[in-house]
Image (cartoon, rainbow, N blue to C red):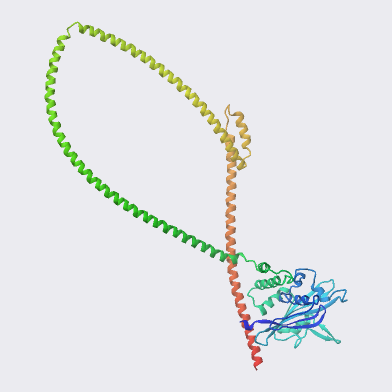
C-alpha cells in the first residue's frame, strides 16, 4: 500500500568532505538544497544518491555528467592543497521512515581512506528502530574528540539489530529487501540505471522531449530470449490464426463462387437437355416423314425393277442373235489381218514395257545414289553434332569437376584429346571418378552427420531453455515466497512497533 512505503527521512555525513558531522532532514521524502555555484550542492547529493542505494562508489557514479575526475577517496580526505590529511574514516547514511508510523530503518556506508593507497569500505543496516544521533552513535568520545567507529566496532554495536557486510552486492541485496522490495535484484539495478540516466543532462542546456525519450530508452533493461519467447509465440500464434482466417475466408469465397458456377452450370445443362428434347422431337417427326417418302419410293423402285427385268430378257435375246452373226463373220479375211495387227501391237507393247523397265532401273539407281548422298550428309551432320555434344559434355564435366574438386579430370581430358582417334580407354578415368564419387559420398555423410549434430545441439539448447524456464519459474515462486515472508515479517514488526507505541 502507498501509505506504508518507506520514505527518506534524514541523511547524514560523518568525517566526509569538509564536514565533521552533518544531518539533513527531509520533508515527506523531499529535500531542497540552495546555494551558489561551487557551494557543494552536487557533491552533497551525489555522495548520497545513488551511492547509498547500491553501494557503488566508482568515479563515474559520483559525477552526474559522467566524468571520472572525482573519486570517493578525494571526497573523504579532501584536497591535498586545502587539507593536509592522509588518513581518515568517515560515514554516509540515509534514514528511512515508514509512512503512518514511527518505524525507522537506516542504511549506510563506512569508509577508511589513505591517500594514494585506496579506500576500504563496509556497509550496514539498522533494522531495530534505533536512530543515529539519538540512541545509536557512529563515533565514540576519545580524549575529548569524536573518533568514528571501525568496521568491527560497528558490528559489535549493531549486534542482532541489523547487518554489517563487506561487499557491495550483499549491501545492495539488503537495501532492496528491506527498503524497495523488488522481486529480483535485476529489476532493482534497472531502477538505479534509470536514476543515473535521468540525472545526467544539464538543466542549463536545451532539454527537448527527444532527449528525455533517448534517456528513458537507454535506461530500459534488455529483454532476454526467454522473456521474448512467450511474446513471439503469441504473435506467431496470432499470425497463424490470422492466416487461417484469411485462408478460410478465401475458401468460403471459392466455395460460393463454385456453388454459383455449379448452379449456373445445372441451369445451362437443364436448358440444353430441354433444347435437345425439342430437337429430338423435331428429328423424330422429320424421320417419320422420310420413312413415308422412302416407302413410296420403294414401291416406285419395285415397279421399275419389274420393267427392267422385261427389258433384260429382250436384250438377252438380241445378244444371242448378235452372237450368231459374229460366228458367221469370223471366217472372213478381215479377221486374219486383225489377228496380225494384234500381234504387232503386242510386240510394240513388249518394247514399250522394256523401255519402261530400263527407265525404272535408271530411276531406282538414281534414287539410290541420292539416298547414299543424303546418308553421307546425314553422317557428316551426326558427326558434327557428336563433336558438339562431346565438347558440351567435356565442358559440363569440367564444371562438375571444378565444383567437386576433381583435379585429375584435367589430366584425363588431355589424354583423351591425344588418343581419341586411335581409341581411348576410359577405365582409368572411370575408376578415378568412381573413387572421387566415393569420397564425395563420404563427405556428404559427414555433412549430414554435422547437420544432424547441429539439430541435436539446437534440440538440446531448446531443452536447456525449457529447463531454464522451469528453473526461472521455480525461482520466481521461491522469490515470491521469500517476498511474502519478508512482507509478513515487516508487517509483524510494524504491528509490534504500533503495539509498543500504544502500550
Q: Quadrant of residue 232?
A: bottom right
At which x and y percent is residue 344?
28, 8
Give the vertical position of 228 relative to 398 (above or below).
below
- Does residue 8 show up? yes
At which x and y percent is residue 285?
20, 43
Give the vertical position of 245 relative to 33 (above or below).
above
Give the vertical position of 433 relative to 453 (above or below).
above
Looking at the image, which is closer to me, 235 or 392?
A: 235
Give the vertical position of 318 relative to 116 (above or below).
above
Looking at the image, which is closer to me, 405 or 113?
A: 113
At which x and y percent is residue 447?
59, 50
Looking at the image, which is closer to me, 74 or 416?
A: 74
- Does residue 126 show up? no
- Residue at 64% of width from left, 93% of height from top? 502
Count the marks: how many? 0
Image quarter of the N terminus: bottom right
Image quarter of the C terminus: bottom right
Name of the residue lying farthest toward the front: 206
At which x and y percent is residue 182?
64, 75
Name of the residue lying farthest toward the bottom: 503
Amino acid at each position: 500500500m502507498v501509505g506504508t512505503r518507506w520514505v527518506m527521512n534524514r541523511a547524514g555525513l560523518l568525517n566526509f568532505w569538509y564536514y565533521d558531522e552533518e544531518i539533513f532532514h527531509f520533508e515527506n521524502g523531499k529535500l531542497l538544497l540552495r546555494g551558489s555555484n561551487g557551494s557543494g550542492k552536487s557533491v552533497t547529493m551525489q555522495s548520497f544518491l545513488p551511492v547509498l542505494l547500491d553501494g557503488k562508489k566508482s568515479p563515474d557514479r559520483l559525477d552526474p555528467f559522467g566524468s571520472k575526475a572525482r573519486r570517493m577517496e578525494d571526497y573523504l580526505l579532501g584536497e591535498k592543497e586545502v587539507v593536509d590529511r592522509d588518513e581518515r574514516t568517515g560515514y554516509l547514511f540515509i534514514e528511512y521512515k515508514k509512512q503512518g508510523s514511527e518505524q525507522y530503518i537506516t542504511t549506510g556506508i563506512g569508509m577508511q581512506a589513505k591517500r594514494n593507497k585506496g579506500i576500504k569500505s563496509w556497509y550496514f543496516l539498522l533494522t531495530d528502530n534505533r536512530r543515529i544521533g539519538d540512541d545509536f552513535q557512529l563515533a565514540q568520545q576519545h580524549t575529548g574528540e569524536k573518533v568514528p567507529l571501525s568496521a568491527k566496532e560497528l558490528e559489535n554495536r549493531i549486534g542482532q539489530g541489523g547487518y554489517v557486510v563487506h561487499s557491495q552486492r550483499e549491501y545492495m541485496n539488503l537495501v532492496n529487501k528491506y527498503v524497495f522490495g523488488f522481486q529480483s535484484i535485476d529489476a532493482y539495478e534497472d531502477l538505479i540505471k534509470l536514476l543515473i540516466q535521468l540525472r545526467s543532462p544539464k538543466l542549463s542546456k536545451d532539454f527537448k522531449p527527444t532527449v528525455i525519450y533517448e534517456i528513458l530508452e537507454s535506461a530500459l533493461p534488455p529483454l532476454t530470449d526467454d522473456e521474448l519467447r512467450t511474446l513471439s509465440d503469441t504473435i506467431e500464434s496470432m499470425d497463424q490464426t490470422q492466416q487461417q482466417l484469411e485462408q478460410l475466408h478465401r475458401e468460403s469465397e471459392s466455395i460460393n463462387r463454385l456453388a454459383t458456377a455449379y448452379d449456373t452450370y445445372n441451369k445451362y445443362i437443364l436448358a440444353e437437355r430441354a433444347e435437345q428434347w425439342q430437337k429430338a422431337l423435331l428429328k423424330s417427326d422429320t424421320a417419320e416423314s422420310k420413312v413415308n417418302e422412302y416407302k413410296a419410293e420403294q414401291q416406285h423402285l419395285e415397279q421399275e425393277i419389274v420393267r427392267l427385268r422385261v427389258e433384260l430378257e429382250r436384250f438377252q435375246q438380241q445378244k444371242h442373235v448378235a452372237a450368231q452373226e459374229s460366228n458367221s463373220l469370223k471366217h472372213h479375211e478381215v479377221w486374219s489381218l486383225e489377228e496380225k495387227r494384234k500381234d504387232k501391237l503386242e510386240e510394240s507393247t513388249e518394247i514399250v514395257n522394256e523401255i519402261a523397265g530400263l527407265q525404272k532401273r535408271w530411276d531406282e539407281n538414281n534414287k539410290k545414289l541420292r539416298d547414299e548422298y543424303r546418308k553421307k550428309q546425314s553422317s557428316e551432320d551426326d558427326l558434327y553434332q557428336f563433336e558438339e555434344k562431346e565438347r558440351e559434355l567435356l565442358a559440363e564435366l569440367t564444371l562438375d569437376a571444378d565444383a567437386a574438386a576433381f583435379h585429375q579430370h584435367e589430366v584425363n581430358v588431355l589424354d583423351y584429346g591425344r588418343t581419341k582417334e586411335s581409341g581411348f580407354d576410359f577405365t582409368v578415368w572411370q575408376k578415378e571418378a568412381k573413387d572421387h564419387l566415393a569420397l564425395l559420398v563420404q563427405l556428404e555423410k559427414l555433412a549430414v552427420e554435422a547437420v544432424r549434430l547441429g539439430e541435436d545441439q539446437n534440440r538440446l539448447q531448446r531443452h536447456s531453455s525449457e529447463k531454464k524456464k522451469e528453473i526461472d519459474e521455480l525461482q520466481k515462486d521461491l522469490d515470491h515466497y521469500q517476498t511474502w515472508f519478508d512482507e509478513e515479517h515487516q508487517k509483524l514488526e510494524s504491528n509490534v512497533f504500533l503495539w509498543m507505541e500504544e502500550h
